[in-house]
Amino acid sequence: MRHVLVTGGAGFIGSHFVKRIIQAEDVARVSVLDALTYAGHIENLGTACLSDKVRFVHGDVRDAAVVDALMADGINAVVHFAAESHVDRSYGAAGGFLSTNVLGTQVLVDAAHRHGVGKFVHVSTDEVYGPLTQGTASEEAALRPTVPYAVSKAAGDLVALGAHRTLGLPVCVTRSSNNYGPYQYPEKIIPLFVTRLLRGLPVTLHDRGQHVRNWLHVADNCAGIEAVLRDGRPGEVYNLGGGTDLSSKELTGYLLNLCGAAWDAVAYIPDRPANDLRYSIDWTKARDQLGYRPQHSLVDGLAETTEWYRRNPDRWAPLTTAALCTVLSSTCRLPAPLETPRGH
């Protein structure tokens, strides 16, 4: 595994993975392909950009010429993070989500097959299973996505797995629960709430704040992805969960405490259509086959994350206005004062 291509490597999860994988002794080169859309920033890579191992390529996964040239440069493995990933944005831009998340994946697997890539890891989400009122979804569960983002990710999963079945491309798919941690773009619920609360601004919860998500530290997800890259069986799907299940109201309580705010900073707004009540995945397979075990506690992880935003306003303050405007303009109903974002 000497040369790894990481798509979306300047995004939130992708940049954390790049910083992790360049520490591996058997990795000599890491090529990062990123379109640097609103949520991708070179700054997310930090000092990894200074590593002799890292080469950054500004490009789109849908650009077949760029992708082919990269694959021809001795790529041994691909870890595919690049995606349109925000649920709220997908309501008004489903075509763009399908283009990047499905057609972009097709471009990548075709090029990987042509150039004999030894491993292809497609990074996905638990949202492809759809909502569960009870129980957990194993890797064999039916895909029942409800929102355009999840639909596009489920279709991308099938493209990648189809390339394994029809072309023999050694593909693995990972599906993780909600990630959190430093450097996340402030349209997602944790960074959005933290950056607003630190400025003394209000936040909003849908309905009674009862929607349940599993929260997994980004470093634990990246550890799981590396385990799948190294030891995952081609053609297999691996759920990566094991964080903490919280309702949005419970999560808000943690963030209020960490930011020194009170419940009078929280307003409740009517629920939106297709706001899945609960996601839950069974990650036994990754634990038993790959030794995957999350290491970060929720209390410590949220404290670390909040402190990063507190110490780095220069990184997120210029982004908050754009994130807020996008969230407001992409909703089906315009709430007041702010729509609560969902998704990874």
Image (spheres, grey):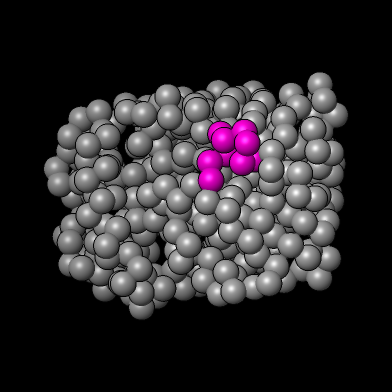
The relative height of residue 206 versus residue 53 in the rendered view (above or below) is above
Q: Residue at x 61, y 55 (%)?
A: 32
In the picture, measured across the screen, residue 147 lies left or right of residue 333, that is right
Q: Percent x, y for residue 236?
A: 78, 36
Percent x, y for residue 247?
41, 48
**In front: 156, or 236?**
156
Compared across the picture, whether 125 is left or right of 198 comes to right
Q: Along the horizontal axis of the image, is 26 left or right of 139? A: right
**Residue 25: x percent and y percent?**
81, 70
Residue closest to the far bottom: 311
Q: Quadrant of residue 255?
A: bottom left
- Identified at 66% across, 56% down, the residue is 31
Residue 66 location, x and y as percent?
Answer: 61, 41
The residue sitting at 27% across, 57% down in the picture is 320
> Is residue 138 visible to us here?
no
**Residue nearer the viewer, 197 or 156:** 156
Residue 37 falls inside the magenta stretch: no
Indicate yes or no whether the magenta region holds residue 63. yes
Q: How many marks?
A: 0
Which residues are the magenta region?
A: 59-67
* Quarter of image, res 144: top right
**Left or right: 334 with respect to 256?**
left
- Residues 240 and 28: in front is 28
Q: Is residue 118 visible?
A: yes
Determine whether 59 is above or below 41 in the image: above
Give above or below for 284 relative to 312.
Answer: above
Which quadrant, please, contains the N terminus?
bottom right
Residue in the image at 69% along x and 46% along y:
70
